[in-house]
Image: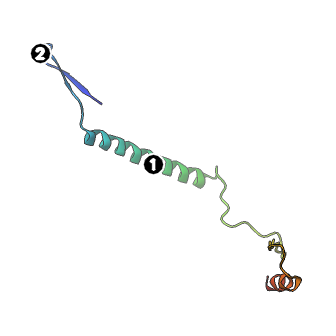
Amino acid sequence: MPTCKVDLTGTATFRPQSHVTRSRLVGYLTLGLTFAMLIGTVGLIASGEVKVIGFPASEGNTIEARLTLTSGIPQSRTKETVEQL
């Protein structure tokens, strides 16, 4: 973001800003936007607009599992694995 100064004689002096000044401004903008999004997110959750379920309730006493074994394994090994589950 360059700056341009005009003195009383009408002469314009062009002075570019340093990279440090520019990066400091972008850093403050990023930090401000991050905190604004955090406050907005907490506000939406606290107001109930966004429903949050920490751990869903189970459907009953039944557990469903999927077992995948490679082909060629003997049937006795498959039965042992199922019993282990």
Q: Position of residue 50 (x, y in %)?
A: 64, 51
Near-viewer residue (32 or 22): 22
Q: Is residue 18 above or below residue 50?
A: above
Q: CA distance from mark 2 to mark 1?
A: 43 Å
Instruction: Return the disc, 2 or 1, that comes first in the chain's sequence.
Output: 2
Mark 2 — residue? 8
Near-viewer residue (34 or 67): 67
Q: Label 1 is placed on what type of residue? A: Thr
Element carrying mark 1? helix
Quadrant housing the C terminus: bottom right
The part of the image, by quadrant, that contains residue 67 is bottom right
Going by the image, does 47 lie left or right of 59? left
Q: Is residue 30 above or below residue 84?
A: above
The part of the image, by quadrant, that contains residue 65 is bottom right
Q: Position of residue 76 (x, y in %)?
A: 87, 86
**Mark 2: few, some, or many residues within 10 Å (few <14, many ≥20)?**
few
Q: Is residue 3 above or below residue 49?
A: above
